[in-house]
Image (cartoon, rainbow, N blue to C red):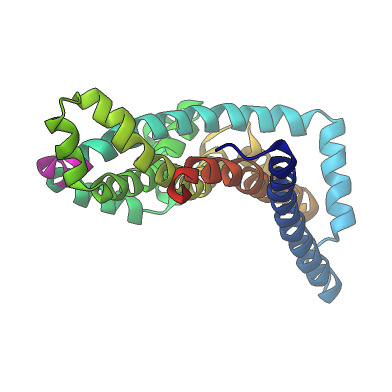
């Protein structure tokens, strides 16, 4: 039975209100800690100076141009991560041989920090768009694989056998049985994957690029201008908070809503 509109609207407002409250609290805590560090000594520029530098970067056209470059690389790498990660995760979850063949390799990739991928891809591909894209892909892939494998293996085998006994095709089992079970875990995997992949992107741009957020951060670091460096760190942190709280949080709740039915 569908809930009346009078009850759905307040529930929707509460969900969005909670998300915005979480974002506000996270940003406020970061700013408060920042300001305390600035007051404690002269090694950390004030928040006002940092924001002023960021405004100057925007006025010079550097902010949006470099952020757009980084986002294009990031979205391409994450798209490849999700497609390959979900496919490999489902195959490993359904096939014992695939799991035995790929588990150790996946665990090794999971243990490798993002900086390793950034350095390797810089040596492999040099300066160019391929270095950050491949870094994003390699840094985020193992998180997706591991979570999807566990989700697939958690699907009751009896449910799949019953579906096949009633003549349900493999494609329908994958669509109506496995996909709903994997959806929530995939979103959870994306949250961890984005953190690692975004770090990898910035490091790859730091070491092997002449554009993007990571490159611009290094520009100010090499110039020994801490306010410029921290201005781009602020962009980096705010991006992660907004993506996690505003986008992935509601998507994860929608993907796992069936569990409460």
Tell me the quarter of the image containing the N terminus: top right
Q: In this rendering, does residue 223 appear at all?
A: no
Outermost residue, left side: 97
Q: Magenta segment: does it hold 185?
A: no
Give whichever of 162, 106 is nearer the camera. Answer: 162
Q: Is residue 180 left or right of residue 171?
A: right
Rendered image quadrant of residue 254 = top right
Residue 97: percent from the left, percent from the top? 10, 42
Give whichever of 52, 9 is nearer the camera. Answer: 9
Residue 24: percent from the left, percent from the top? 77, 55
Give whichever of 65, 83 is nearer the camera. Answer: 83
Residues shaded magenta: 93-99
Q: Which residue is painted at 82% across and 43% down in the image?
A: 54
Residue 161: percent from the left, percent from the top? 14, 38
Q: In this rendering, does residue 182 appear at all?
A: yes
Residue 32: percent from the left, percent from the top? 80, 66
Q: Which residue is painted at 47% across and 50% down in the image?
A: 260
Label tally: 0
Outermost residue, front side: 1
Is the residue 65 above or below the residue 53 in the image?
A: above
Q: Is residue 231 left or right of residue 142?
A: right
Q: Is residue 165 left or right of residue 122?
A: left
Rendered image quadrant of residue 101 = top left
Q: Which residue is painted at 21% across and 42% down in the image?
A: 159
Main SS, magenta region, reads: helix
């Amino acid at each position: 039975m569908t809930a009346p509109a009078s009850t759905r609207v307040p529930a929707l407002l509460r969900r969005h209100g909670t998300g915005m409250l979480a974002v506000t609290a996270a940003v406020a805590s970061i700013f408060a800690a920042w300001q305390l560090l600035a007051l404690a000594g002269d090694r950390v520029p004030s928040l006002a100076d940092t924001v002023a530098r960021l405004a100057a970067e925007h006025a010079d056209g550097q902010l949006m141009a470099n952020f757009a470059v980084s986002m294009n690389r990031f979205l391409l790498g994450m798209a490849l991560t999700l497609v390959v990660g979900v496919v490999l995760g489902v195959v490993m979850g359904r096939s014992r041989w695939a799991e035995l063949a790929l588990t150790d390799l996946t665990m090794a990739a999971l243990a490798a920090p993002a900086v390793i991928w950034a350095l390797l891809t810089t040596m492999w591909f040099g300066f160019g768009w391929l270095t950050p894209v491949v870094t994003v892909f390699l840094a985020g892939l193992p998180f997706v694989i591991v979570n999807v494998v566990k989700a697939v293996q958690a699907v009751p085998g009896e449910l799949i056998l019953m579906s096949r006994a009633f003549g349900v095709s493999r494609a329908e089992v994958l669509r109506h049985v496995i996909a709903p079970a994997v959806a929530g875990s995939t979103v959870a995997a994306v949250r961890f994957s984005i953190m690692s992949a975004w770090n990898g992107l910035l490091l790859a741009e730091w070491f092997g690029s002449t554009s993007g957020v990571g490159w611009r951060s290094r520009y100010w670091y090499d110039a020994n201008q801490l306010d410029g460096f921290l201005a781009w760190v602020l962009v980096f942190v705010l991006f992660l908070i907004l993506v996690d709280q505003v986008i992935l949080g509601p998507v994860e709740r929608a993907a796992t809503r069936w569990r409460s039915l």
